Amino acid sequence: IKQLRLVLGDQLNAAHSWWREPDDQVVYLIAELHQEATYVVHHIQKLVGFFAAMEAFAKALQAAGHRVDYLTLDATQAYADLGALLEAKLLEHQARSWAYQLPDEYRLDQQLKALETRLGYPVERVDSEHFLTSRSAWQQYPHHRMEFFYRRLRQQYQVLLDPQGQPLGGKWNYDAENRCALPQTVSLPEPLCFTLSVEPIVARIQRHQLPYLGRIDAKAFIWPVTRRQARQLLADFLTRCLPFFGRYQDALSTRGWSLFHSRLSFCLNTKMLHPLEVIRAAEAHWQAHQDVISLAQVEGFIRQILGWREYVRALYWEQMPSYAQTNALQAERDLPAFFWTGRTKMACLRQAIEQSLDYAYAHHIQRLMVTGNFALLAGIAPDQVDRWYLGVYIDALEWVELPNTRGMSQYADGGLLASKPYAASGQYINKMGDLCGQCFYQVKQKTGPQSCPLNSLYWHFIDRHQAQLANNARMKLVYANWQRQQPEQRAAVLATAEAYLAQLEAL
Ligand code: FAD
């Protein structure tokens, strides 16, 4: 054949120009790889989600007339590594050259570049045709803040603009109208869950003794694994969640595990859905339903995909590989074992961790302001925090996980991504949801053995990082507040925090 083309598990982009028409001189290689299943301990639903989506994609390509060499772990275990597999397949198919789509992760980018030389065959590198900006976007866009990046992309792609090129409604960003807590009177939509039987995949994962975390119902796998299902989830989001997306985007609640969030990250990150397709669908749906959906809702949603998603990717490629080593706040503590079990007396952490283990999913505020905030305040080593986030979520791929974890949530990059640490006391958790009512700890107390640990840990964090943070304009008020407190009160708060830090495992 002319060419062997490698398709990675997160390159399930049906609109890619590779598949424009079948060519019997081309074979596509889609393979479950041991290396991809083990570079971190993944959630079982993540392993299954990727494997099931790859299998479905291989079948869809074959049905469309393409030649696909689809291999499960059973077939790939014979090869020492990806290079050995490619080498064998190049020979087997008598291919004259090979090709791959630019991977999204630095790790794979390095590996594939090295394989170009090692294999010695002519190679073609093509774009994955998924993102709305290139890998070098950081250099191409003028302001290194998300908001300006986002505005440029709104203009470039003509999203939510009037005919004069101005933002619809006169403002670029409606965040101020969002961020509400969820009232008990607002009912939540039941999340759309699929019920796929994935027993053979689970059996295969167990047979190959792949390490994993979390739980799964192998008879009723809930995540979409085909483009059709992905589009169903999108349609369901638009009708049932978009009307309230922005308003309750920052809410926390005991009543549901995804609230009004889309749960589209897995479909987007595997490329089953294209970001522009999602953005255009949201814009069109809003246009047709302005009686029930305000501009603030759709703008809030589109900003996450057009703004944040592209922005963190740009930062990732600009900063790698050093970004993965950043630890600006010199955080060194171990991640408590309850991150793998949910066994903690803190209700907010318990809920976020348990549902992460149950569904391989937590919404943004749970990741940022519950688990992330705790790790930040407690000074957990970013390497350990990263490994947990990279493993536990179904949507976790390093290009998006790392900037969000190291940067946004742990401030380990010293402020490259976030202009101040996302640090909060128990008061914030209490304001945004109904979790504190069920907690062993008392959110109103700052000191003593039953005080909410987040309260004293918050001030301990503020106090111990004074040299680094006090000059940050956005932190001035916080430091003024801390200084205003009586010395005895400050000492008592710090002593409570020290006691908690000494036994994090017991929280
Ligand atoms: P929605 O709230 O419905 O948002 C819609 C879409 O916008 C998401 O599907 C996602 O594609 C995009 N989006 C929203 N926020 C972000 C963001 N901060 N960065 C990039 N894209 C965003 N997202 C991942 O896709 N993979 C990760 O591994 C990941 N790790 C994270 C780790 C931490 C510590 C934090 C704070 C955030 C992380 N995020 C990650 C970002 C965000 O939390 C998830 O994208 C989101 O929760 C996915 O759920 P959803 O699809 O329901 O999102």
Image (cartoon, grey):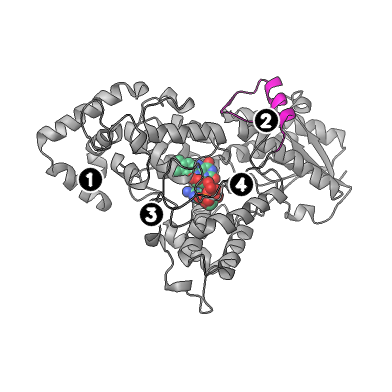
Between the C-alphas of marks 2 and 1, the distance is 51 Å
Circles 2, 3 touching at the beta carbon (< 8 Å): no
Between the C-alphas of marks 3 and 1, the distance is 29 Å
Label 3 environment density (alpha carbons within 10 Å; few <14, some 14–19, many ≥20): some
Residue 206 belongs to magenta span? yes
Between the C-alphas of marks 2 and 3, the distance is 36 Å
Label 1 environment density (alpha carbons within 10 Å; few <14, some 14–19, many ≥20): some
Q: Is residue 62 found left or right of 498 in the rendered image?
A: right
Amino acid at the residue labelled 4: Leu
**Is residue 123 placed above or below 439 in the rendered structure?**
below
Q: Is residue 418 found left or right of 264 in the rendered image?
A: left
Say whether disc 2 or disc 1 marks the residue closer to the N-terminus. 2
Say whether disc 3 or disc 1 marks the residue closer to the N-terminus. 3
Residue where numbered disc 4 is placed? 192
Mark drawn on residue 470:
1
Mark 1 vs mark 4, foreground winner is: 4
Give x and y (percent) for residue 147.
43, 60
Q: Which residues are magenta?
A: 196-218
